[in-house]
Amino acid sequence: MTTCGCAHHTPPRVLENVTVVANDRVAQGVGLVTFDSPRIARDIQPGQFVHLRIAQGVDYLLRRPFSIYRAHAGRLEILYQVVGRGTRDLALATPGTEMDMVGPLGCGWRIADSTTHALLVSGGLGAAPLGMLAEELAERGIAVTVAMGAPCGERLVGRDLFERVARRVEIATDDGSCGTAGFVTGVCGEMVAEGGYDAVYTCGPEPMQRIVAAQAAEAEVACQVSLERLMACGIGVCLSCVVETKCGLRRACVDGPVFYAKEVVWDSAHDVTCER
Amino acid sequence: MNVNVDMSVNIGGLSLRAPLLTASGTFGSAREFSELIDLNRLGAVVTKGVSLEPWEGNPAPRIAETSSGMLNSIGLQNAGVESFCVNDLAWLESEAPQVPVIVNVSGHTVEEYVAVIDRLEWEPFIAGYEVNISCPNVDAGGMAFGTSCASAAEVTRACRGSTERPLIVKLSPNVTDIAGIATAVEAEGADAVSLINTLLGMAIDVGTFRPKLARGVGGLSGPAIKPVAVRMVWQVARAVTIPVIGMGGIMTAEDAIEFMLAGATAVAVGTANFVDPTSTVRIVDGMAEFCHARGIERVADLTGAVLA
């Protein structure tokens, strides 16, 4: 029997009280919040996520799942887009604000020992789980190339980090205000076709990930995707965040959020961003 | 914690060390919580609903957040009773042998409920059953059985015929007279009733004009439903002599105490497990502290103690 999603060992999950250290706007509608979170920052792997309780005593209850952009020196950096009440409250959090998070959660990016050159494809806030991966790959001596896209130059996220660790960064914007005009999938398609990559990692709007997955499949390069789903528990019990895979329904929170693209049964019902 | 309060309660012959259970469907089969809490602190684990064959559940989106609550339409996705016994039950028996396990049983037909129990009767490590006649998210079975006295009685009678283990029937709030249903299942030999399951609800995205749940409607849970649940526990506790397990929006020890005062012998914690995975033990501790601070020696003394 084949399995889809995570099989390898993940670090134990904990509930940790965390403190906001910094919280700044880094692009149009996008913030970067840094938490003092020694325990989770020590254990979390690239592509894993945390489940953050942003506020208490409010009339929305659920935690919000966030990818980790960077983890270093006991701190976690999270890129977020203001899309609903939870993220609006997060944007207003000042340094010193206390919250709690459950983590590390989920199954992150897999890095094969044989990987020599990885292509990372980021669409909009897709940089959120890719920053930590780019740093990890570079640290292991694996060459990193990045294709990143956004609606416009003001909404490009993660460029500094990618330019620091990648040997090449290609940019596409819908309006042409930065880099090539058009979707990142155009740039990415040409790069994948040129060859030379033995792994593709992508995160962004689901239609974009679907196209990148097809391009990688065409070039016969293994592709991993990080999927977003509405989530309640984050630890595998509520079955809210199911992803249809070739081996049946899998939970984004424990079997993902990272999946091999070839496992995923793509469904346009998930093309909208979760409004949280 | 050094508070001298007797926290034990008895549910239909089943002795529990604490008056707190997990609400079915919010705790899996406990394994996922074992890193975060000491399962031995719980009165019992009530498992996710188990059916005869694997069920796929409903399309996503399956949840929507609403004011002080959430809607879900999971649809009882589960891998079936055989997988449950081999994987979940085996894990519980080996890793949490001291914790009573109550298996929540689901079916599309009366025969399916009975078949699930018949299979589970072969497993020694089961403390009792909770019969789910109240899920609002499946087309056949589920809530359909729990909304008339006759069908609720029929399912209870059939399940009773298959087991001598404690049999709890979980009731739906989507009825006119929940006390009447409770009386009907008591007459057929139920050892206890648990209530409430979720309230049927709906939310619509005004941006897209579409329901927020793929299935359209779903079950509302969380603090939003607590006053309805407390009222129903109060009504049922006055109508039956069997124990009542109260649930619906319990987030704090004070919420749990409120259900006990209304007539519950024990409580169950559900949606709070998603918000704070340590909710169950925090609430048990808070209930003991509450009793200690007021000189209440037995938590069971709270049951039905609401002043008229």
Image (cartoon, rainbow, N blue to C red):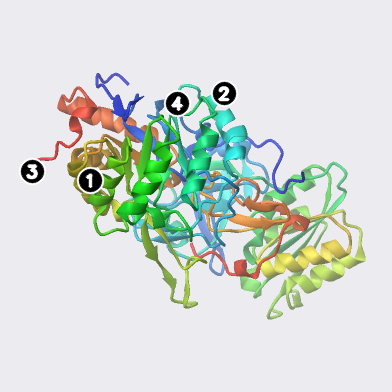
The lab-note entry on whether marks 4 and 1 share a chain reads: yes
Give the Cα distance between marks 3 and 2. 47 Å
* Mark 3 chain: B
Numbered circle sitting on residue B308: 3
The reply, left or right, for residue B204 in relation to residue A179 is left
Query: Please, what is the three-letter code of the amino acid marked with disc 3?
Result: Ala
* Mark 1 chain: B
Q: Mark 2 Cα within 10 Å, few/some/many (few <14, many 20+)? A: few
The reply, left or right, for residue A125 in relation to residue B270 is right
Question: Vertical placement of A154 versus B157: above or below?
Answer: below
Q: Mark 4 Cα within 10 Å, few/some/many (few <14, many 20+)? A: many
The residue pinned by badge 4 equals B99
Q: Are marks 3 and 4 in contact (CB under 8 Å)?
A: no
Query: Please, what is the three-letter code of the amino acid marked with disc 2?
Result: Ser
Residue B241 at x, y percent in the picture:
21, 36
The residue pinned by badge 2 equals B94
The reply, left or right, for residue B145 in relation to residue A146 is left
